[in-house]
Image (cartoon, helix red, strand yellow):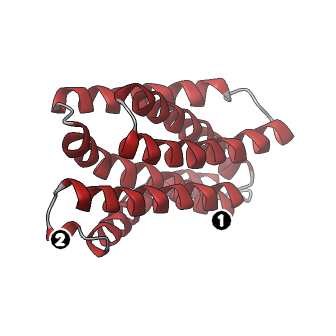
């Protein structure tokens, strides 16, 4: 159950740090409208759902491979997203945010079912009821850690292009690392 909680924590930290800072990066570095940024959040959510549905019937070994693969996919796609934010156009950015959503969605649903399947007899309800708390803690830590990294990378000095490029490297690199650690867990 502890491993499922840690993986769940890393999933939440990954998506919160990504969704907190991606709008700023896209708005300043690509002059993207807030409406388009909202559509990207929608695409991320739809991809999350598709990822969850795609792995819903897996069991045992395939389930574990898909859970690890989902977080590994999210990690690699986050690195690609970082490169696209720094040098690319909106098409690869849109595709990569979808791939991140697919990976996180796949792992999320599998970690929920895994955590429930390994709970001790009689502790199933405690395990189930604590998962939203773990998610909230992961979201809070992900956003806080990303904020600390962003400020350390120069965000406190302003939001000019050069500063945000440096911040994007550090924040998105750390976000990819969180996903990679989730895959290892």
Q: Secondary structure at mark 2?
A: helix
**Residue at 47 percent of width and 63 percent of height:** 174
**Residue at 40 percent of width and 28 percent of height:** 94
* Residue 59 percent location from the top left of the image: 80, 35
* Residue 185 percent location from the top left of the image: 69, 61
Depth check: give the residue in front, 174 or 64: 174
Q: Earlier in the sequence, mark 2 or mark 1?
A: 1
Q: Kindly identify which numbered label has been placed on residue 156.
A: 2
Query: How many numbered circles are shown?
Result: 2
Depth check: give the residue in front, 75 or 128: 75
Dot 1 crowding, Cα within 10 Å, few <14, some 14–19, many 20+: few
Residue 84, quarter of picture: top left
* Residue 46 percent location from the top left of the image: 44, 25
Residue at which label 1 appears: 2
Dot 2 crowding, Cα within 10 Å, few <14, some 14–19, many 20+: few
Is 162 displayed left or right of 112 in the figure? left
**Residue at 23 percent of width and 48 percent of height:** 24
Q: Secondary structure at mark 1?
A: helix
Residue depth check, mark 2 versus mark 1: number of the one nearer the observer: 2
Depth check: give the residue in front, 60 or 97: 97
Name above or below for residue 51 compared with residue 26: above
Name above or below for residue 181 compared with residue 68: below
Residue 54, quarter of picture: top right
């Amino acid at each position: 159950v502890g491993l499922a909680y840690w993986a769940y924590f890393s999933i939440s930290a990954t998506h919160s740090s990504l969704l907190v800072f991606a709008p700023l990066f896209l708005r300043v570095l690509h002059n993207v409208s807030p409406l388009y940024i909202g559509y990207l959040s929608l695409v991320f959510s739809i991809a999350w759902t598709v990822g969850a549905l795609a792995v819903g019937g897996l069991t045992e070994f395939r389930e574990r491979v898909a859970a690890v693969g989902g977080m590994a996919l999210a990690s690699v796609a986050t690195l690609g997203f970082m490169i696209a934010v720094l040098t690319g156009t909106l098409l690869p950015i849109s595709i990569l945010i979808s791939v991140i959503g697919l990976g996180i969605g796949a792992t999320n649903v599998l970690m929920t079912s895994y955590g429930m399947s390994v709970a001790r007899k009689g502790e199933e309800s405690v395990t189930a009821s604590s998962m939203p708390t773990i998610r909230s803690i992961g979201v809070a830590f992900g956003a806080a850690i990303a904020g600390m990294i962003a400020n350390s990378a120069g965000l406190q000095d302003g939001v000019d292009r050069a500063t945000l490029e440096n911040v994007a490297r550090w924040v998105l690199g750390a976000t990819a690392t969180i996903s990679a650690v989730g895959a290892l867990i």
